[in-house]
Image: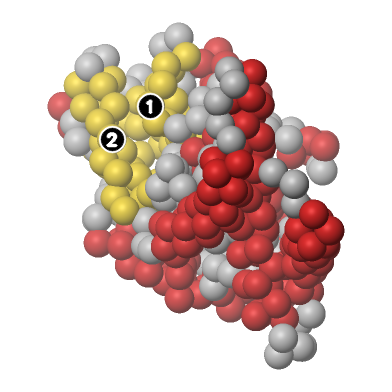
Amino acid sequence: MDLGPIGMLLGAMLLATSAVLVRIGLVAPSLRRSRWSEPLTWTGLLAMGFFSSLLVLTFIRDLLLAGLALMGSGGPAFDHDSALAVPLLALAVTAIGFVNARRLARIKRVDVPIAGLPRELDGYAIAQISDIHVGPTIKRAYLNAIVNKVNALKPDAIAVTGDLVDGSVQRLAPHTAPLSRLAAPDGVFFVTGNHEYYSGAEQWIAEVSRLGLRVLLNEHVIRRRGEASLMIAGVTDYSAQFFNPAHKSDPSLAAAGAPDGVAVKVLLAHQPRSAPAAADAGFDLQLSGHTHGGQFFPWNLFVPLQQPFVAGLNRVRSLWVYTSRGTGYWGPPKRFGAPSEITLVRLVPG
C-alpha cells in the first residue's frame, strides 16, 4: 500500500514518539523529587510494551504480504485492512497484557515426586515467589498483597528466588517492608538474582536480612521432621561473579558440610542454568525463576537461547528443576501468554 507523504510523516512521528516515550519510561524513576516521575514512568513503560507488539505485528504483516504477493493473492483492500488491524491488535494485546500483569498472581500447585521420600516429609510444602521486581511500577501495595496470599498458604518454608528489586535500598526500602511479615515454621529464605547486583547486592542482602529473611549465599540449613531431615540450600546468582568475585555461584559449596542421611536436598538458584552443577552436587530439586516464562510474545521464543528451561517442572538427570514464571514483571506492565504465579511446591513419594 502506498502510504504517500502523509502516511510517511505519521510513521516518522510514531517512530520518534516511541523512542522518546520509552526513554522517558526508563529514566523517569530517577526523578525522585518530581511529581511527574511516576506518571512519566507509567507512560513510558506502557509505550514500551505497545511499540514492542506493534513492531512484532508489523513484521508478521510484512511476511504475510510478501507470501501473498508470491502467490498472486492479496490486493489493495487486504493491504488497507491489515494496516489498520496491526495497531488495533497491538493496543488490544497491550491492554490484555496490562490486566494480566497487574492482577495478583495466582497459586500454581506443583507436586514433585521424590524417590524414597520419608513418610515424615510427605507433603512438605515450599511456597516460592520470584522476580517480583519492586521498582518503577511495583510498589508496597502490590508486594503486600503477595505476602498476604503466600502466608495464607501456610507452607512449611518460603523461598524468594531472586530479582526482588529494581533500584536502590534508599529508594525502595519502604516498598519492600512487607517482606518482614512473611512467616513459615521452617523459615523464609532468599537468594540473589541478577537484578540485585544491578541495584547494589551487598546493601540489599543487608536489608533483606534486616527484614528477617535468611539469605543463603552458597550455604544451606537443615530442617527436620521427626527422624527425617531436609536440606534447603541457596546459591548466589549464576552471573554474580562478574559483579563480585567472592559471590561466585557454587552449588557444591552450598551443599558442603551437610550431615549424613539427609533425605531431600533442595537448592534455591535464581537461574535455571545452575541445574547441571546442582545435579553434580547431588541435589534432588532446584527452584528457579529468571525467565518470566518469556513474559509476552515473542520474547518467550528467545529464552531457550540462554536458559535450558522457560517454565514448569523439568528434569536434569536425577534433579528436578522447577522454573517459575515469576510473581511480578520487569519493564512494561505486560504479560501475555505467560501468567504470573505464586508456586506451592509439595514433595510427594516418587
Asked whether the viewer can see residue 334, the reply is no
Q: Looking at this view, is 134 or 36 the one in front?
A: 36
In the displayed orientation, state which residue is furthest to the top: 317
Percent x, y of residue 117? 24, 21
Q: Looking at this view, is 5 or 239 the one in front?
A: 5
Do the residues under discs 2 and 1 have CB atoms within 8 angstroms? yes
Q: Amino acid at mark 1?
A: Leu
Q: Which residue shows up at 81% across the image and 42% down it?
A: 244
Label 1 belongs to which residue? 313
Q: Looking at this view, is 339 or 318 the one in front?
A: 339
64 is higher (above) or lower (below) than 54: above
Label 2 belongs to which residue? 110
Label 2, secondary structure: give it: strand
Q: Looking at this view, is 16 or 298 the one in front?
A: 16
Quarter of the image for residue 66 reads: top right
Apparent side of residue 6 relative to residue 53 in the rendered image (left or right): right
Q: Which residue shows up at 35% across the image and 45% down it?
A: 343
